[in-house]
Each structure stands twice: as structure tokens, then as C-alpha cells.
Image (cartoon, rainbow, N blue to C red):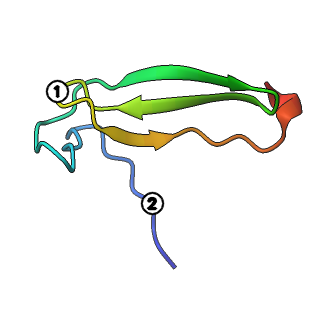
Amino acid sequence: MLNLIEKNDTNPICPYCGNTLTSLWYQLLTAWLGKRYIYFCPHCSKFLGVSHRKGFWMG
């Protein structure tokens, strides 16, 4: 089993450009299945991930 540990004293590093991420850029994606957000690095603009929601009724 993998243990989750909350860390608030460090910032993640972009896997593409290596800069410390103190913020993220995001953009809203809308479709008939609901809303999603795409996240990307503010330094190099590389794609980092997409939010996931279960079910379109959640908005």
C-alpha cells in the first residue's frame, strides 16, 4: 500500500523544464460531458494534466 503524506513546505518541479512550480496555469475545457480543466507549466507551457470528474451531471 502507498502512503500519502501532505507536504506544504516544498513546491513541485516541472518534469519538462525543471523550474519550480509556485503556480499553475489552467484552461477550461467544456464538452457535452461536462467541464474539465487542462493544467500547464507557466514557464514552458507544457501540458501537465487534465482534471477528471466522474459523470457529466457534476458539471
Which residue is pictured at 31% across the width and 45% down the height? 7
Name the side, left or right, on which 54 lies relative to 29: right
Task: Tell me where residue 10 sits by quadrant.
Answer: top left
Q: Residues within 10 Å of mark 1 (few under 14, many from 20)?
A: some
Where residue 53 appears, as percent x and y from the top left, is: 71, 40
Name the side, left or right, on which 8 lies relative to 56: left
Which residue is pictured at 56% across the width and 20% down the height? 28
Farthest residue to the left: give it. 18
Nearer to us: label 2 or label 1: 1
- Residue 23: mark: none
Earlier residue among tags 2 and 1: 2
Task: Tell me where residue 46 sits by quadrant.
Answer: top left
Where residue 54 appears, as percent x and y from the top left, is: 78, 44
Classify 46 as above or below 42: below
Name the side, left or right, on which 11 lies relative to 38: left
Report the amino acid beneath label 2. Leu
Taking depth in this image into account, of 13 and 32 the one nearest to the observer is 32
Where residue 19 appears, as percent x and y from the top left, is: 11, 37
Q: Residues within 10 Å of mark 2 (few under 14, many from 20)?
A: few
Please give the count of numbered marks on the rendered protein: 2
Taking depth in this image into account, of 58 and 47 the one nearest to the observer is 47
Report the amino acid beneath label 1. His
Give the residue number, with chain letter if any, for mark 2: 4
Name the side, left or right, on which 38 lies relative to 54: left
Q: Quadrant of the C terminus?
A: top right
Where residue 43 appears, as percent x and y from the top left, is: 17, 27
Which residue is pictured at 36% across the width and 39% down the height? 47
At numbered mark 1, what does the secondary structure look like: helix, strand or loop? loop
Which residue is pictured at 24% across the width and 24% down the height? 42
Classify 47 as above or below 27: below
Give the residue number, with chain letter if any, for mark 1: 43
Classify 12 as above or below 41: below
